[in-house]
Image (cartoon, helix red, strand yellow):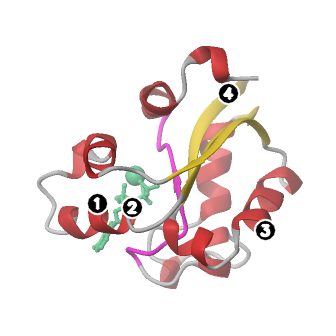
Amino acid sequence: MTETTLSIIKPDATKRNLTGRIIAHFEEHGLQVAAMKMTQLSRREAEGFYAEHKARPFFGELVDFMCSGPVVLMALKGEGAVMKNRELMGATNPAEAAEGTIRKLYARSIGENSVHGSDSAESARRELSYFFPATDLY
Ligand code: ATP
Ligand code: MG
């Protein structure tokens, strides 16, 4: 089934000039960019986006980090795109990420882990609508 999911290239990666390599990784593994914009998130936007983690001890750190530099917001489209994107990203903690995954290749720590990806079809719908009106998708 063709799906669309939300991907974010996080500030640790944009600052290290990894944007092109990360997009190429998705394209080389069967996902297509269906919408894309580079922006710097406000605190309000980052807090709203990660609202599900509000009670976690790392929430403040997570919001600070996500606002610390530019991010690239992307809608990625393809067969089983939600789970495919999660597989390509690798585990949250790069120390536990499989060989060849984006986080294994590029992430610096569990916090500065280079990419975000929606974790279910329902999250993908919510997260895509948070950043992209349906009319922006190709
Ligand atoms: P994401 O939602 O960014 O795709 P994920 O689904 O793999 O990542 P979540 O459990 O949703 O992981 O955590 C959201 C983000 O919060 C992580 O990507 C990471 O940046 C940060 N985070 C998670 N756990 C920790 C932690 N123990 N310490 C610091 N930051 C953390
Ligand atoms: Mg998550």
Please state which amino acid type lies under the numbered disc 2: Met
Please state which amino acid type lies under the numbered disc 3: Arg
Please state which amino acid type lies under the numbered disc 4: Glu
Dots 4, 1 in contact, CB < 8 A: no
SS at mark 1 in the image: helix
Q: Which mark is residue 63?
A: 1
Residue closer to the observer: 15 or 9: 15
Name the residue carrying label 4. 3
Does 115 appear above or below 93?
above
Q: Which mark is residue 21?
A: 3
Q: Residue at position x 16%, y 60% from top? A: 56
Q: Is residue 66 left or right of residue 61?
A: right
Q: Position of residue 55 (x, y in %)?
A: 11, 54
Please state the extent of the stretch shown in magenta in the rendering.
Answer: 110-120
Q: Which callout, 4 or 2, points at the residue further toward the start of the chain?
A: 4
Does 42 appear above or below 92?
above
Badge 2 density bin: few <14, some 14–19, many ≥20, Cα 10 Å: many
SS at mark 3 in the image: helix
